[in-house]
């Protein structure tokens, strides 16, 4: 129901009131136009009250598990409430977090700082990413490119409204449509890459209830098919759907999304390696297995629209002040001082 007033004045129809949508204004004017060709529109569009928004900070990280023979994996939450937690795998336990710092359970004392840690065992490398609150204890001599950030999207949506994110692309997918006397092939495009969908709700006690669906998909040409002459790749997908309640600034992680791949490689000496029997002596095959784990870290925040009215800043003062001729001439020799222009004399009769 909209508070609308209709008044008739001679041959005119005057409509007034406050409505919430432009579509309501159009409908009212159409109805009033049935009774009179002269309709005075005095309707105003009301601005809805501000709604709080949810800012979702998401980080997609991928860990290469093939380089980690002996791994203790920990996720430390150093959020606003200072309530860290830890998750451990294999033989290494999670580090205990206290008031003075972090004490490792593998015999190494770690200083209680955010970026600098000292490890006594030379075979243990402690990799820390403070920007995503992610800590990893690695047992190896050389560890390079262990952690890779796939995407760091920030999404904002109103409470109860969905938001979506895609970093990737679309690949063509042929669809065969058969008829009685012909066969048609149409092309459809399907997305792949890093995707995220979430819907958040803000409760009365400032608790954020979220439904989050992260997904990472890649094209797999190993299992590709040929359809009507088109090479259609398969899609390798890692996806999770969860619903959780968090406070403003708290972080939760989704882990355990593994991906295992085996790639065969053959190397040979050109020419000799192609011979039927003796060529086997000059060929070698190797299988490379890769294991990666997908980590998704999500941090929701409550954002309120700006309520204060800001005044326009004052105009800056001029860099140069006005020229004062007597003061300017005081530093110039008398013969070179500026002279006022001669007054024009009146024409003589």
Image (cartoon, grey):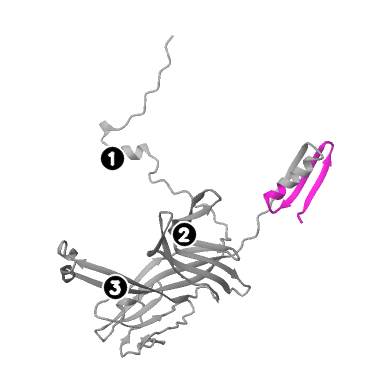
The residue under label 3 is 288
Q: Residues within 10 Å of mark 1 (few under 14, many from 20)?
A: few
For the record, the magenta segment spans 1-25
Q: How far separated are the C-alphas under marks 2 and 1?
A: 76 Å
Q: Is residue 71 magenta?
A: no
Q: How far separated are the C-alphas under marks 3 and 2?
A: 28 Å
Q: How far separated are the C-alphas under marks 3 and 1?
A: 85 Å
339 lies above or below 302: above
Q: Are marks 2 and 1 in contact (CB under 8 Å)?
A: no
Q: Indicate which disc residue 191 carries.
A: 2
Residue 290: % across, % down: 33, 73
**Lower sequence index among marks 3 and 2:** 2
**Lower sequence index among marks 2 and 1:** 2
User: Which quarter of the picture shows residue 172?
Assistant: bottom left
Residue drawn at point x = 27 percent, y = 32 percent: 336
Q: Secondary structure at mark 2?
A: strand
337 lies above or below 60: above
Q: Is residue 3 magenta?
A: yes
The residue under label 1 is 331
Residue 349: % across, % down: 44, 9
């Amino acid at each position: 129901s909209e508070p609308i007033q209709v008044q008739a004045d001679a041959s005119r129809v005057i409509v007034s009131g406050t409505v919430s949508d432009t579509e309501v204004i159009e409908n009212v004017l159409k109805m009033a136009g049935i009774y009179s060709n002269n309709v005075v529109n005095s309707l105003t569009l009301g601005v809805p009250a501000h709604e709080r928004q949810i800012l979702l900070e998401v980080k997609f990280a991928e860990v290469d598990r093939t380089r980690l023979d002996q791994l203790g994996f920990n996720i430390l939450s150093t959020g606003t409430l200072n309530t860290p937690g830890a998750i451990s795998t294999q033989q290494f336990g999670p580090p205990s977090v206290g008031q003075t710092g972090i004490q490792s359970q593998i015999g190494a004392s770690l200083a209680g700082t955010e970026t600098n840690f000292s490890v006594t065992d030379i075979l243990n490398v402690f990799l820390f990413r403070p920007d995503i609150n992610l800590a990893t204890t690695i047992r190896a001599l050389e560890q390079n490119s262990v952690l890779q950030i796939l995407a760091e999207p920030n999404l904002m949506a109103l409470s109860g409204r969905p938001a979506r994110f895609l970093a990737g692309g679309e690949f063509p997918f042929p669809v065969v449509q058969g008829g009685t006397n012909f066969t048609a092939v149409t092309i459809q495009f399907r997305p792949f890459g890093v995707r995220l969908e979430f819907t958040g709700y803000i409760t009365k006690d400032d608790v954020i209830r979220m439904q989050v669906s992260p997904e990472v998909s890649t094209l797999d040409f190993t299992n590709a098919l040929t359809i009507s002459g088109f090479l259609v790749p398969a899609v390798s997908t890692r996806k999770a759907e969860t619903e959780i309640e968090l406070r403003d600034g708290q972080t939760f992680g989704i882990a355990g999304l593994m991906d295992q791949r085996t790639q065969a490689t053959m190397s040979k000496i050109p020419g000799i390696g192609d011979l039927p029997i003796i060529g086997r002596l000059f060929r070698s095959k190797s299988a490379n297995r890769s294991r990666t784990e997908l980590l998704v870290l999500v941090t929701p925040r409550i954002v309120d629209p700006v309520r204060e009215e800001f005044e326009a800043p004052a105009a800056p003062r001029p860099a140069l002040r006005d020229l004062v001729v007597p003061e300017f001439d005081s530093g110039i020799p008398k013969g070179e001082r500026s002279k006022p222009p001669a007054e024009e004399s009146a024409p003589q009769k």
